[in-house]
Amino acid sequence: MQATNDTSPEADRVLTEVYRKMTIGEKWRRLGSIYRTARILHATGVRLRKATATPDEIRDDWLAITLGDSLLNRVKEAAGGPRR
C-alpha cells in the first residue's frame, strides 16, 4: 500500500536538507523530545479512556503498543512480573 504524502517535493527537499545539516547530537535531542511527547500524548489518551488508570497500567499499555504483547510478556516473565 502506498503511503499518502501531503508534503510538496520542494518542502520535502528542504526538510531533508535541514536534517542532513543537523549534528548527531541535535538529531538525538529531537528524537528524545518526540519520544517524550508521544509518551505524554499516550498517557493522556489512556487517562481519557480510563480515569483511574495507574502509572503501571499506562506504562504496560505503552509497552504493549511499542513492543507487542508477545515481547512484553517475555520481558515481564524475565522480570518476574505478571503477564498481560
Image: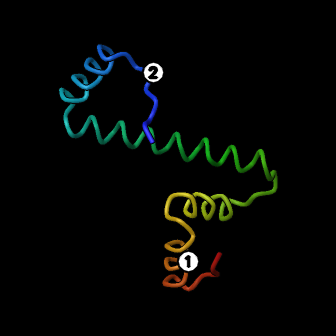
Pointer 2 local density, CA inside 10 Å: few below 14, some 14–19, many at least 20 = few
Rendered location of residue 52, percent (x, y): 81, 56
Secondary structure of the residue carrying numbered label 1: helix
Q: Quadrant of residue 10?
A: top left
User: Which residue carries the number 1 mark?
Assistant: 73
The secondary element bearing badge 2 is classed as: loop
Looking at the rendered structure, the kind of residue marked 2 is Asp
Q: Nearer the viewer, residue 55 or 22?
A: 22
Under mark 1, the amino acid is Asn
- Distance from the alpha carbon under mark 2 to that under mark 1: 38 Å
Q: Which residue is depicted at the point 57% across and 64% down?
A: 64
Rendered location of residue 2, percent (x, y):
43, 37
The numbered dot on residue 6 is 2
Q: Is tag 2's residue or tag 1's residue first in the polypeptide sequence?
A: 2
Residue sitting at the far front = 1
Q: Quick one: quadrant of the N terminus?
A: top left
Graded by Cα atoms within 10 Å as few (under 14), some (14 to 19) or many (20 or more), the crowding at tag 1 reads: some
Q: Could you tell me which quadrant the C terminus lies in?
A: bottom right
Question: Where's residue 61, x and y in %?
Answer: 63, 60
Residue at left 66%, top 58%?
58
User: Looking at this view, is 72 or 23 the one in front?
Assistant: 72
Which residue is located at x 65 percent, y 48 percent? 43
